[in-house]
Image: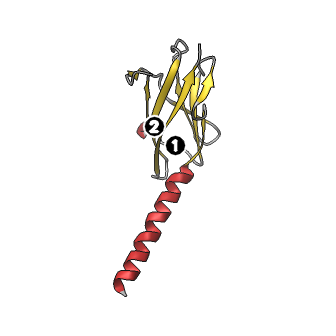
Amino acid sequence: MKSVVSFCLFASLLLAANQAAAALEQASLPSQQQEEELVPANVELTFSGPVDLARSTATLLDPQGRTLPLGKPFLSGPDGSIFKIPLDPAMSPGLYTLDWRVLSMDGRSAEGRYQFRVEP
């Protein structure tokens, strides 16, 4: 009986942790696999609460998998919940991958990867 209760408690904590991390990210721009004729000025990640900018990171990979330099990320929105990553407007055509990790001000973290394509 004790092991069943322990398992149920563990399962409920795991589910709650997964839901908290999933709730942290609400939207991202540009969307997955979106084709852009022009390079967007910024990649924007919108979250449900304030982001800890000092502990949040983003890495952009070019079509060959090389890390590209990014502008300094910044926050916007009324409560600092939009994490913006400036892009180089001279990016070549191709499929780009953004890896990101964000820590919210209340200690929750989320990470993800998405791709977008810049067309000639």
Q: Position of residue 48 (x, y in %)?
A: 60, 48
Q: Earlier in the sequence, mark 1 or mark 2?
A: 1
Q: Residue at x 63, y 37 (%)?
A: 77
As drawn, 61 above or below 90: below
Q: How many marks?
A: 2
Q: Position of residue 80 (x, y in %)?
A: 58, 40
What is the quadrant of the N terminus in the image?
A: bottom left
Residue topped by disc 1: 51
| Disc ID at residue 12 | none
What is the quadrant of the C terminus in the image?
A: top right
As drawn, 105 above or below 113: below
Bin the neighbour count of mark 1 within 10 Å (Cα to Cα): few under 14, some 14-19, many 20 and up. many
Q: Residue at x 58, y 33 (%)?
A: 44
Question: Separation of disc 1 and disc 2 at Cα?
Answer: 13 Å
Q: Residue at x 43, y 70 (%)?
A: 11
Image quarter for residue 61? top left
Instruction: Tell whether label 2 touches label 1 (CB within 8 Å).
Output: no
Residue topped by disc 2: 100
Q: Position of residue 98 (x, y in %)?
A: 47, 31
Bin the neighbour count of mark 2 within 10 Å (Cα to Cα): few under 14, some 14-19, many 20 and up. some
Mark 2 residue element: strand
Residue kind at label 1, given as amino acid type: Val
**Scheme of colours in the image:** secondary structure
Residue kind at label 2, given as amino acid type: Trp
